Amino acid sequence: MFKLLKTDGQTKARLGQLRTVHGVIDTPIFMPVGTQAAVKTLDPRELRELGAQIILSNTYHLCIRPGMEVMEKMGGLHQFMSWPYPILTDSGGYQVFSLARIRKIKPEGVSFRSHLDGTALFLGPKEAMHMQKVLGSDIAMVLDECPPHTSTQRQLHDAVERTIRWAEHCRQQPRADGQLVFGIVQGAGRPELREQCAKALVSIGFDGYAIGGVSVGETEAEMMKAVEYTEPFLPANQARYAMGLGTPAQIVELVARGVDMFDCVLPTRIARNGAAFTRKGTVNIKAAYCKTDPGPIEEGCTCFACRTFSRAYLRHLINVEEILALRMISVHNCHMYVQLMTDIRRHIAQETFAEFRAEFAWTYVPSKNLRANKSIVAE
Amino acid sequence: MFKLLKTDGQTKARLGQLRTVHGVIDTPIFMPVGTQAAVKTLDPRELRELGAQIILSNTYHLCIRPGMEVMEKMGGLHQFMSWPYPILTDSGGYQVFSLARIRKIKPEGVSFRSHLDGTALFLGPKEAMHMQKVLGSDIAMVLDECPPHTSTQRQLHDAVERTIRWAEHCRQQPRADGQLVFGIVQGAGRPELREQCAKALVSIGFDGYAIGGVSVGETEAEMMKAVEYTEPFLPANQARYAMGLGTPAQIVELVARGVDMFDCVLPTRIARNGAAFTRKGTVNIKAAYCKTDPGPIEEGCTCFACRTFSRAYLRHLINVEEILALRMISVHNCHMYVQLMTDIRRHIAQETFAEFRAEFAWTYVPSKNLRANKSIVAE
């Protein structure tokens, strides 16, 4: 399924292609997040036009609303949301452990109450895989336990044990036709747990491997370490996915550490605060200097928003609370991420990725208050 | 500017074309409402795709935000909102009398405070026309006084007198190149005031005539009467515009009474409540029966929303508060209005409008709680 086309000579960056039922995706890739079967404010045409090849959605949220009965009757997620291209679904493990009120963890799964209305639900490997079969996603994720960043060594150890056991069960469940299943490596910031978990999952054998337990409140340095502790134990000929990451600067650094796939709510979330990603950092379209600025969000950008509207107009729309502003900044931000990945791939192909990485780190001014943490309910 | 192509034999319906700086529009026509320089949730491409030929915007709201200084620097409204097609701007009279806190009415205009932040402002014929010159709209409206529906005979009489005097002043003001100026007939439900106002405005001479003081809280029967009292005194060879009207059923009836132009916030406003216009009446997409309905909002509809999404999906989006739902129902509703006007024009051309009107009245079930009243702040 995964074809490793090239490995960078100076970094661990990789160029590849992943074949799924709904099409081939180029890696490194960014997946816009459509938690509730919609990438916030955007329609499928806009997503395709801005260059999205694959999007992510979420089993936990779709299980709660509209529910799997509706999803089954509607013929699965692609048809439901009118997106005939690849979709990756998260298993819901992350949300059960971050959003829901857990009642009991058992070997066969977790009893919990919905964060929305308290409905009693049960999620185990069997349920997670069955729901993803109903959704018909191209890539399903195993059910994992993602413990809080502040857990004890004992708790982290138990979570890894349970993650491995559940992964085994997930591996044995029926899948949708051609559906790929990825394992998820847990182990927080402990090298020995990361190694143990990665090796166990690889011996079970999956179609790709995710690095979980990142963007859960740890520092950026700790996040990078967690990836570095995991990556050496993942097979070179399969895709690696860093879950819930990250800022543009982090993504460039993670590609350099051998990661192929990314998802992050930041492009759509910060758009809703009037903030836009550019190659030099974030800009706040609400700022006074945008009041009569006839230029686009980012000079030279080819997205629909930048081809069509000025900063002055978008600032006005934000001021008068017109939804079109959020939409257009979301278009730009998703396009910026997708375009960044295109550039990364080109530089890996041309063997100039190390220079690109250095230049990006020099040019891009990270915003201190941006967190890729995905625990907020809405996404 | 206005070319009367055909008058219906059995009703007063008219087929025409109005030439403006930014293009020719076919009448009878519906103008989607972009009060604050945006038709709520929609972008210009969507508007054009759903068939909009002309949109409406509002001088009062644009004067408050972003302000005329910004509008001037940004090169006018067409460039600001990236809509290179015809625009009609209301003068702001309606909003001054319905939204603002009036301090004093003088011969040369009204002192008032902004509904938003209490800023002291002044609007007279000179100011209204100057601002519309800055906006560069294709059709500017004169400043009128639109008194409450409950006014005394004396107040109505004074408002008509003032409306005529202000219209004279407006007529003498400088305009943008090629800008058309329409007079506004007031006079509430009084036939003698409607006649007086219409005749006075016609003798001043405008490029078209609007019927104002409708959709201000009167009954539908009173509204129809107000139009019937006015229409006979308007020149046949110029466009007539019923301001702020109406429901689909009302529009068909108003076309039969000789009205050529319409604007109404209903298509976008009811979309935000999950309600959609169809040829048979409104449907509530939130309704339980839509839960697993794989069909579009309206069978046979060719709008982007109906071509792309099911009722089940849109209902889910409303439930989880995804903005895409409001957008898509707005696309459908505006398309429904625009398509209705296209059908009306075809039937006038084919001399089958009377039959179409009878069939529409039979098929379309009006929703009792829909009001075209446009006094709500946001629009």
Image (cartoon, coloured by chain):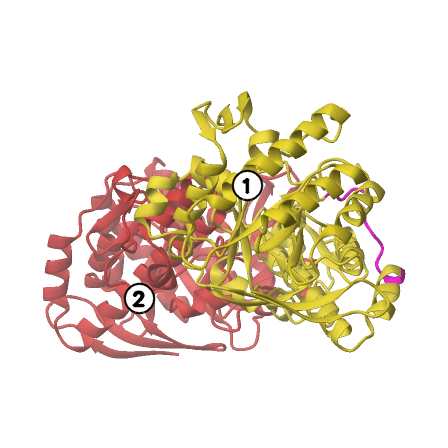
Chain colours: A yellow, B red
Assign a secondary structure to mark 2: loop
Q: Looking at the picture, how far across and down is residue A105, in whole percent?
A: 55, 23
* Amino acid type indicated by mark 1: Glu
Residue B158 is at least partly visible in this image: no
Task: Determine which residue is flagged by label 2.
Answer: B302
The residue stretch that appears in magenta: A362-371
Q: Position of residue A83 (x, y in %)?
A: 45, 60
Evaluate whether label 1 is on the same chain as label 2. Answer: no
The residue at the far front in this view is: A203
Main SS of the magenta part reads loop
Residue B170 horizontal/vertical position (percent): 52, 62
Q: Which residue is mark 1?
A: A168
In the displayed structure image, the side of residue A62 where residue A39 appears, left or right:
right
Circle 2 residues within 10 Å: few <14, some 14–19, many ≥20: some
Nearer the observer, disc 1 or disc 2? 1
Residue B368 visible in the displayed image: yes
